[in-house]
């Protein structure tokens, strides 16, 4: 397991979260000023300096539920609220999108280009805030400094760590199903065409050499694919053409797509196992959350600005059905800790979480306040 994986995982999943939220803000015709505020507030919180310092420290990955807790906080860093069903769907879309990107990376090192694509797009969401742009650029520089000198073997270990993290997730996403890049069982289809990794040749030739290193024989074979040579390597600098398209916004205005999902019994079974299995790293996960959230600044809204509820489903009825049909044991709402917990650490975490409380905002839709209840109280039940 690589101790350098967490920053890449967090930043890429955060980028996918912003893509989905931007698409839903536009789909629900949320006023532009409110939509811009939501995105600016989330990005500012996500790239907070103290938070990034904790994130970039070498550390092991922990469970999906621990990371999910951080994204719950992040999604509610502004005036927008998501209920449980929409938050579940958001997290599922984030994880499946990034899993697909990691699987399709031509080289292990290209996961860094995927990260840069996400950060490039995030900068495009920022409106009238040089300070937030500077925060993102500082994270860019940290990535270049830390990951720019890693070997191919170290990137391979990072990629393996990411794939292990995603290995039991087989959630079907309608966009992937329509594009025929995902099968009905939730597994992705790997292409047998397109450019080969930079620095490699198109398959089809076997060369044999003697003990002096001289080529003595060449055999051609049919590889069954439709490959082409890569014309250019993507830029690993702060600015430049990334070439690789993985990690760009698939929910962009130019290509509107649905965010519908459909789960299978296998999905439910694998996630049930994850949620109820005893966690030997329970204490470390609490420490991890306390450190990360201690560096995450949640902006408190000032003045009478109203909040609003965002729905990741087409209708309220669909959202309600998803919430009712989801088995209780699959809820991400409470982290299931089955180990002796350190009381002092719990008190520290409770104190940090108490500082994050955001004043409840009235909804502009006029619907019941309970309809848009956020998840900010979930850690109180630890």
Image (spheres, helix red, strand yellow):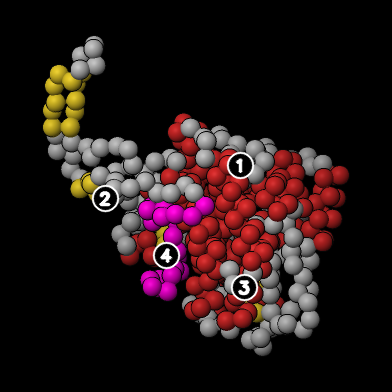
The residue shown at (20%, 45%) is 225
| Upstream in sequence: badge 3 or badge 4 | 3
Q: Residues within 10 Å of mark 4 (few under 14, many from 20)?
A: some
List the residue tagged with mark 4.
Answer: 250
Q: Is residue 248 magenta?
A: yes
Indicate the secondary structure of the residue bearing disc 4.
loop
Q: Residue 366: name its quadrant.
A: bottom right
CB within 8 Å, label 3 to label 2: no
The residue shown at (29%, 37%) is 200
List the residue tagged with mark 3.
Answer: 128
| Upstream in sequence: badge 4 or badge 1 | 1
Residue situated furthest bottom in the rendering: 366
CB within 8 Å, label 4 to label 1: no
Q: Is residue 264 magenta?
A: no
| Upstream in sequence: badge 2 or badge 4 | 2
Q: CA distance from mark 2 to mark 1?
A: 32 Å
What percent of the width, then of the height, locates residue 49? 70, 53
**Quick check: 159 left or right of 47?**
left
List the residue tagged with mark 1.
Answer: 61
What percent of the width, then of the height, locates residue 203? 22, 37
Image: magenta residue range: 238-262
The answer to whether residue 365 is visible is yes
Q: CA distance from mark 3 to mark 2?
A: 39 Å
Indicate the secondary structure of the residue bearing disc 3.
loop
């Amino acid at each position: 397991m690589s101790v350098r994986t967490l920053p890449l995982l967090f930043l890429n999943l955060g980028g996918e979260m912003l893509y989905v939220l931007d698409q839903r803000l536009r789909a629900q015709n949320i006023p532009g000023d409110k939509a811009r505020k939501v995105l600016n507030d989330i990005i500012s919180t996500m790239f907070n300096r103290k938070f990034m310092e904790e994130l970039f420290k070498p550390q092991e990955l922990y469970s999906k539920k621990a990371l999910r807790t951080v994204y719950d906080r992040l999604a509610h860093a502004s005036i927008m609220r998501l209920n449980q069903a929409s938050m579940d769907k958001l997290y599922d879309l984030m994880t499946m999108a990034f899993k697909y990107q990691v699987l399709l990376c031509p080289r292990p090192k290209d996961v860094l280009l995927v990260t840069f694509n996400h950060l490039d797009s995030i900068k495009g969401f920022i409106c009238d805030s040089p300070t937030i742009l500077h925060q993102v650029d500082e994270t860019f520089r940290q990535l270049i400094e830390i990951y720019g000198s890693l070997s191919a073997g170290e990137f391979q270990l990072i990629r393996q760590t990411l794939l292990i993290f995603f290995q039991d997730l087989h959630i079907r996403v309608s966009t992937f199903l329509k594009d025929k890049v995902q099968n009905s069982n939730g597994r992705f289809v790997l292409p047998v065409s397109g450019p080969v990794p930079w620095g490699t040749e198109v398959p089809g030739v076997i060369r044999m050499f003697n003990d002096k290193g001289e080529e003595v024989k060449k055999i051609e074979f049919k590889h069954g694919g439709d490959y082409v040579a890569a014309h250019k390597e993507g830029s690993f600098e702060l600015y430049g053409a990334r070439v690789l398209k993985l990690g760009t916004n698939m929910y962009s205005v130019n290509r509107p797509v649905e965010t519908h999902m459909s789960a299978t019994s296998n999905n439910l079974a694998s996630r049930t196992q994850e949620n109820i299995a005893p966690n030997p790293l329970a204490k470390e996960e609490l420490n991890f959350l306390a450190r990360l959230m201690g560096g995450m600044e949640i902006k408190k809204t000032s003045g009478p600005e109203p909040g609003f509820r965002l729905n990741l489903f087409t209708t309220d009825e669909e959202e309600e059905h998803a919430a009712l049909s989801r088995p209780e044991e699959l809820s991400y709402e409470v982290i299931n800790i089955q180990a002796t917990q350190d009381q002092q650490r719990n008190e520290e975490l409770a104190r940090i979480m108490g500082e994050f409380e955001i004043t409840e905002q009235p909804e502009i839709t006029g619907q019941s306040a309970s309809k848009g209840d956020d998840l900010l109280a979930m850690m109180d039940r630890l």
